[in-house]
Amino acid sequence: MKVGIVCPYAWDMPGGVKQHIDDLAQALIAQGHDVSVIAPTGDDADLPAYVTGAGRAIPVPYNGSVARMSFGFISAARVRRWVRDGSFDVLHIHEPLIPSLGVLACWAAKGPIVATFHASFSRSRAIAVAEPLLRSALEKLTGRIAVSDAARKSLVEQFGGDTVLIPNGVTVARYSDAPPLDGWGPDGRTLGFLGRLDEERKGFPILLEAMKLLPSSVKLLVAGPGEAKIPKSLRDRVTLLGLVSEQDKIRAYHSVDVFCAPNTRGESFGIVLAEAMASGATVLASDIPAFRRVLGEGQAGALFANGDPESLAREAAALLEAPERRAKLAAEALVAVRKYDWSTVARDVVRVYETVTASGAGRVEEDLL
């Protein structure tokens, strides 16, 4: 099957949606499909052979974060040319409700079109104002996927219609075996964090407050872009790696005793949890609904009260003092994460492709209207 995939966010910046699309593309290629991805990126970017650049991305505040997107005449022209030249059996658009390539692709194409919705959202003035334009795009969709119950619920409540639930994926084998980072390794006193430091909803300030309550022997290894002010009292206990490569990210998971995910909101799944679980790490996460589901209500990882540094510190200290409990949670996590392996998730996505192409809509074509 020839599949065109539309990524809304800049290809050269880390992020859960971009990682999802890249892993899906590679899984589909491994299963014998012909895949082309279009994404916001500059013309000088070093891209995989299956990725086409659609123009430079610009930062846009979105869903409590700052996303890098493309939207304009140059991007629209490149999307149209990519659709026209692709002769795709199915077009797979990710996040078609945000002002980026997904909306442009919906306007530019007709035929079998599937969309995946990653984020949960609430009704807002911006959505209300844009609803007529968004509906014109959604009406072209012949299949809809949500990665979580939260994303599905918000979509159905806002726009109605049926949506298939297919969770995010993780390539389990990629994370299962890696050496710790130089000078690091599980030692009974190391916590880890991965995420943007300057996004409030990722919860890094909460983790720093918790560190103040933990014994001075406890260390924190941090990976991710952005700037953060580390209190003077913690500077010899907190190590900031900055933006790391994919391989060093995996090594970081293998370098800690407890991986902490203090995210406060805006998460519909939690890909970092799945990655940490696949790495064999013990996970400690805020008890937001998405994280509770991924961790089986605490069976595959520990939970603490969302936004509460004292609760985080208390649970972290208990885990660091209980190696047998950590080992049990990590073993449960390795079992639980298998259902999210891309070898399974990609086949579920292909079933949606097969359903929409079986309807007789023909190939994807440029919409000249």
Image (cartoon, helix red, strand yellow):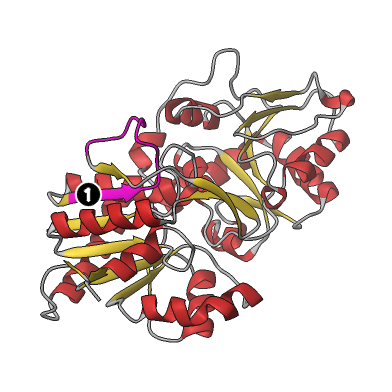
Query: Hey, which residue is sitting farthest front in the picture?
Result: 73
Magenta region's main secondary structure? Answer: loop
Residue 197 shows in this picture:
yes
Quarter of the picture holding the N terminus? bottom left
Q: Residues within 10 Å of mark 1 (few under 14, many from 20)?
A: many
Coordinates of residue 281 in the picture (x, y in percent): 54, 37
Total numbered labels: 1
Coordinates of residue 92 in the picture (x, y in percent): 29, 62
Coordinates of residue 201 in the picture (x, y in percent): 69, 53
Quarter of the view holding residue 135: bottom left
* Residue in the picture at 63% in, 52% down: 65
Query: Is residue 309 rendered to the left or right of residue 87?
Result: right
| Amino acid type for the residue under numbered disc 1 | Ser
Quarter of the picture holding the C terminus? bottom left
* Depth check, front residue: 75 or 260: 75
Quarter of the view holding residue 141: bottom left
* Residue in the picture at 60% in, 25% down: 186
Which residue is label 1 attached to? 36
| 269 over 334 or under it: above or below | below
| Residues rendered magenta in the picture | 35-49
Query: Hey, which residue is sitting farthest top in the picture?
Result: 183
Coordinates of residue 23 in the picture (x, y in percent): 33, 46
* Residue in the picture at 36% in, 52% down: 75
